């Protein structure tokens, strides 16, 4: 099971955190500080796994961002690398060649996407297409609701003129 | 519109925060935003609620407190529209965790949303429930989730299945309800549902044995079919990763197979074919393929696979291990640790490669490899492995040294077969990484040295030598200082030189120098300094010429700011100045430390109380209680093998916390020295102190200052156990004291008989020391001429320690008109497992001719 997902920038800034196991706010801050120290200081040629407090953290660097997932000791580390890549590819398709800024300004979108890929710390969907379709459908629901709201407010505005 | 809530757009806020150059600026921006959001919350502003919540989430991610926004999430979730709910649920998952009571308030909204007609809203609710639900919520909402498992929409089904996993993890009792639905999910075609279903089954198996049985019966076949289909499937662009269709499904099915096939021959049998196919046909040039192979190997190891399949799996691991990719090597090491229980031989074959990995530049790989090496060590390979590791210790990274040192120490302790080797290895570790050696490890070393009289000289000289180059290694300094204090005269007089040693001349003042350096180094801590002071005190009585100088050094510390040192310095000073008459007995060598007691204490298991100990002894034997060593142990206590650390049942001596003797002679060594101090009430203190020098040490190492030269020659032969040891005060023969009424009775045997000579052995044993046997050898001359220059020599197997006392004479009168007697003390470290055996050799002059007779004694009475 994936205990948490962490996206940290090269500078140690947190870009996304998702906790599937229970950690209090205090613990979360501590975990992030500890792990970013360990991971950011690792050299480029080393393996992508770090043992930490009896768990394993699998991380992978994409440009300036580190994608980290903390897993149980008996999980498949190599597969987690694939899940990370799966997530990145879906982000890439959604944003059109994703960069760190996309994830900063649209952090909520990144969360929505992650919620379609992982649930309860387990993989939910192995098809990128399906994830994209589900996200698109929900986005369009939001768009329609917005349009409706603006058209209603237009009508009200016109009526009260 | 509310003037407070209009605020900035989310995008603008993020921009403003990013534009901040200092942390203070950022805090100011965040504070302003939070103030606006709080105002909006108290105004109950609805238009910008979702935007405010989004801002709060961003602020939360930066690490600022956002608890005031929690209720906003609930309000958004309770509103009707999808956009509000979407952001509301996201906020709920980010800002809250299952331990917050606010979460309970959302149960009702969740229940409504789980029954919503819009599948996306149901999806949102399932997602939130699956990610953060508490045990109570799980119980309340389990029926809804279970119902959704039967639905039609694959999106809902897969989310419901994963949500069920969380529910089962929180409330394992609910597992039964999900068995049926989970099994039917495996019949689906949609990959998302399949993946979720397989995962649900895996978790059910973990939660409940009934579920495991049920799924084993109903799903094994279906699972094999799924794996067959997916691994034989033609190119499917939607699921393809590097030429493999849906590796995620592969891996999850393999994992569930492992659960089902574990300890079940039938289902394992059923899986063999497809596992062989996956193991042989999966491409291993990409990470995806390796991920599947890795999982497949683990499954093969986990189930009752055929031996051929296991060989295949081990071979895959061998390939992984030689891979250039660090990730692959890491998982290979990981897997080999599990494989070692299945096929240790196969793993041993990769020993050299694994040993190389210990020296890898990657900390994760090193750690894995070190743990694996630890598992690989056995009696046969411990020497080369320990050598490799110790060699590496020299060049390894600082942060790795701690782990490495601990592992080396535990390997050396666990597998050492001879004391010399153990001591040598420990000295190497101490001089290379003494700062990383844990206290109990060097305490144990001291105990061992104290119990190896023939190695004490060697030890103190080696330590002295090591000290010259490695003063910065704290625990080396401590052990060295302790040994120099105890065995200083062996250092100077070169007592008990082993063949391997290089000759070395150390003067008395050199030895004092060494201790003085340790005492005065800046880096030395309190314990080391206090130990140095004691060592100096001891040396002052052994090296009389230096006592003036030692007195000066001790006096210097009278003004020490450390209370402990000051006190010691004053005490010692007064001993040196005013109590010359008792000093020599006061600073006598520590009695032999009780290994069994120390090991038992280290294991930290048994703790008999002092009073119980005392009451178990008749008061008449109170005198023997004061014997400095050993007697205080419960009668017939099983002495454990020296290096068997697992001895939980070893007798443990009560540690007398305020034992003065302990305090005086063994500062910093409470563990190792308390065993040497007889348990006694504080009023006996002085008696105790003084009794050390006068009462014979029962198994003391050193009774042979009156060894005649002929006996000495005899003794030097059966080394490594009986090198003569000089002890200035203890002149009494060792067999003087054992209380006779407690002795066990063994028949006297004729150990050897030839035409000229007969040897009879009689035995004595103290019940509280079953390992130790005192043998009185009686030599009788059967010939008609007197035998002169008679020397008796004996040799024993490695597990036995032998101590020869001087013979009563070296001339044996003819025709049995007199005898020579000689005492032997043997300690059988494998008492109860291996019988005693001995080879003997007698040299004498018979009619002016040198004669030599040899023999083997194997007719020892059983039980020795």
Image (tube, coloured by chain):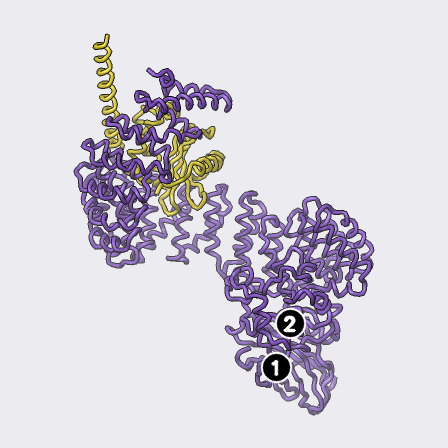
Side (left or right) of A80 relative to B212: right
| Label 1 element class | helix
Disc 2: CA contacts within 10 A as few (<14), some (14-19) or many (>=20): many
- Residue B759's disc is none
Number of numbered labels in the structure image: 2
Q: Residue furthest top?
A: A161
Q: Colour of chain B?
A: purple
Side (left or right) of B551 relative to B158: right
Side (left or right) of B643 relative to A153: right
Q: Which residue is mark 2?
A: B625
Instruction: Give percent across and percent down for residue B7.
Output: 38, 17
Q: Residue furthest left?
A: B152
Q: Is any part of residue A37 visible from this angle? A: yes
Label 2 vs 1, first from the N-terminus: 2
Q: Colour of chain A?
A: yellow
Image quarter where the C terminus of chain B lies is bottom right
Q: Which residue is mark 1?
A: B741
Marks 2/1 in contact by CB < 8 Å: the verdict is no
């Amino acid at each position: 099971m994936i205990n948490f997902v962490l996206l940290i920038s090269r500078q140690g800034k947190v870009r996304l955190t998702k906790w599937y196991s229970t950690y209090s706010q205090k613990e979360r801050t501590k975990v992030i500080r500890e792990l970013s120290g360990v991971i950011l200081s690792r050299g480029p040629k080393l393996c992508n796994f770090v043992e930490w407090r009896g768990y394993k953290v699998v991380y992978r660097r994409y440009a300036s961002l580190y994608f980290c997932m903390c897993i149980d000791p008996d999980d498949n580390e190599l597969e987690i690398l694939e899940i990370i890549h799966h997530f990145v590819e879906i982000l890439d398709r959604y944003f059109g060649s994703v960069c760190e800024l996309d994830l900063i300004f649209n952090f909520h979108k990144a969360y929505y996407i992650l919620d379609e890929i992982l649930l309860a710390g387990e993989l939910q969907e192995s098809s990128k297409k399906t994830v994209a379709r589900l996200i698109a459908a929900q986005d369009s629901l939001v768009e329609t609701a917005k349009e409706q709201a603006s058209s209603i407010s237009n009508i009200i505005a016109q009526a009260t003129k | 519109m509310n003037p407070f809530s209009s605020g900035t757009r989310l995008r603008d806020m993020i921009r403003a925060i990013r534009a901040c150059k200092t942390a203070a600026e950022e805090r100011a921006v965040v504070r302003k935003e939070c103030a606006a959001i709080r105002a909006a919350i108290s105004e109950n502003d609805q238009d910008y609620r979702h935007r405010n919540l989004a801002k709060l989430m961003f602020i939360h991610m930066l690490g600022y407190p956002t608890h005031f926004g929690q209720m906003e999430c609930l309000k958004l979730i309770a509103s009707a529209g999808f956009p509000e709910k979407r952001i509301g649920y996201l906020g709920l998952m980010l800002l809250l965790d299952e331990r917050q009571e606010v979460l309970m308030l959302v149960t009702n909204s969740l229940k409504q949303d789980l029954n919503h007609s819009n599948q996306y809203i149901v999806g949102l609710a399932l997602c939130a429930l699956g990610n953060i639900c508490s045990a109570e919520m799980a119980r309340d909402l389990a029926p809804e989730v279970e119902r959704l498992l039967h639905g039609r929409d694959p999106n809902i089904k897969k989310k419901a299945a994963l949500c069920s996993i969380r529910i089962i993890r929180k409330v394992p009792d609910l597992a039964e309800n999900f068995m049926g639905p989970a099994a039917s999910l495996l019949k689906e075609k949609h990959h998302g549902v399949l993946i979720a279903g397989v995962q649900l089954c895996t978790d059910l198996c973990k939660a409940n044995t009934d579920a495991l049985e049920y799924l084993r019966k109903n799903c094994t076949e279906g699972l094999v079919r799924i794996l067959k289909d997916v691994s034989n499937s033609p190119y499917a662009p939607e699921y393809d990763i590097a030429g493999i269709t849906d590796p995620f499904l592969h891996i999850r099915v393999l994992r569930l197979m492992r659960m089902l096939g574990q300890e079940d021959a039938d289902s394992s049998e059923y899986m063999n074919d497809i596992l062989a196919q996956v193991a042989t046909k999966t491409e291993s040039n990409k990470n995806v393929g390796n991920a599947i192979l890795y999982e497949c190997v683990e499954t093969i190891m986990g189930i009752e696979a055929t031996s051929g399949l296991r060989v295949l799996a081990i071979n895959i691991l061998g390939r992984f291990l030689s891979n250039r990719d660090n990730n692959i090597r890491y998982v290979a090491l990981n897997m080999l640790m599990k494989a070692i229980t299945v096929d240790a031989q196969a793993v041993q074959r990769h020993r050299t490669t694994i040993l190389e990995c210990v020296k890898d530049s990657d900390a994760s790989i090193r750690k894995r490899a070190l743990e694996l090496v630890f598992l690989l060590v056995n009696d046969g390979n411990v020497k080369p492995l320990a050598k490799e590791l110790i060699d590496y210790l020299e060049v390894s990274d600082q942060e790795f040294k701690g782990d490495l040192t601990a592992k080396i120490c535990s390997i050396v302790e666990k597998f050492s077969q001879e004391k010399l080797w153990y001591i040598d290895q420990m000295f190497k570790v101490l001089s290379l990484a003494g700062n990383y050696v844990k206290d109990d490890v060097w305490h144990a070393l001291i105990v061992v040295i104290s119990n190896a009289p023939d190695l004490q000289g060697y030890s103190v000289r080696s330590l002295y030598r090591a000290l010259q180059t490695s003063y910065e290694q704290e625990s080396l300094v401590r052990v060295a200082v302790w040994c120099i204090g105890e065995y200083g005269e062996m250092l100077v007089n070169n007592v008990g030189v082993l063949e391997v040693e290089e000759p070395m001349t150390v003067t008395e003042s050199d030895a004092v120098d060494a201790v003085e350096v340790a005492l005065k180094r800046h880096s030395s801590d309190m314990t080391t300094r206090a130990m140095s002071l004691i060592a100096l005190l001891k040396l002052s009585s052994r090296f009389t010429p230096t006592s003036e100088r030692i007195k000066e050094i001790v006096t210097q510390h009278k003004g020490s700011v450390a209370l402990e040192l000051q006190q010691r310095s004053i005490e010692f000073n007064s001993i040196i100045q005013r109590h010359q008459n008792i000093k020599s007995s006061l600073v006598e060598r520590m009695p032999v430390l009780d290994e069994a007691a120390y090991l038992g204490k280290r294991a930290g298991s048994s703790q008999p109380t002092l009073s119980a100990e005392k009451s178990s002894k008749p008061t008449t034997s109170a005198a023997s209680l004061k014997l400095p060593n050993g007697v205080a142990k419960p009668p017939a206590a099983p002495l454990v093998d020296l290096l068997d650390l697992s001895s939980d049942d070893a007798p443990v001596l009560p540690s007398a916390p305020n034992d003065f003797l302990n305090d005086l002679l063994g500062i910093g060594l409470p563990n190792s020295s308390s065993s040497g101090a007889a348990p006694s009430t504080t009023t006996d203190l002085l008696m105790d102190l003084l009794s050390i020098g006068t009462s014979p040490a029962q198994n003391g190492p050193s009774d042979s200052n009156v060894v005649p030269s002929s006996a000495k020659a005899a003794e030097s032969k059966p080394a490594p156990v009986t090198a003569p040891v000089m002890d200035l005060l203890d002149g009494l023969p060792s067999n003087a004291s054992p209380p006779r009424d407690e002795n066990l009775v063994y028949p006297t045997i004729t150990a050897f008989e030839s035409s000229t000579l007969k040897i009879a052995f009689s035995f004595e044993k103290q019940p509280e020391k079953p390992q130790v046997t005192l043998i009185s050898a009686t030599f009788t001359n059967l010939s008609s001429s007197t035998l002169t220059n008679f020397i008796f020599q004996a040799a024993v197997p490695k597990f036995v320690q032998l101590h020869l006392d001087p013979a009563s004479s070296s001339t044996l009168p003819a025709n049995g008109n007199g005898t020579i007697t000689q005492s032997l003390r043997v300690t059988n470290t494998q008492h109860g497992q291996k019988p005693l055996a001995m080879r003997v050799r007698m040299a004498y002059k018979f009619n002016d001719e040198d004669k030599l007779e040899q023999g083997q004694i194997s007719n020892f009475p059983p039980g020795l």
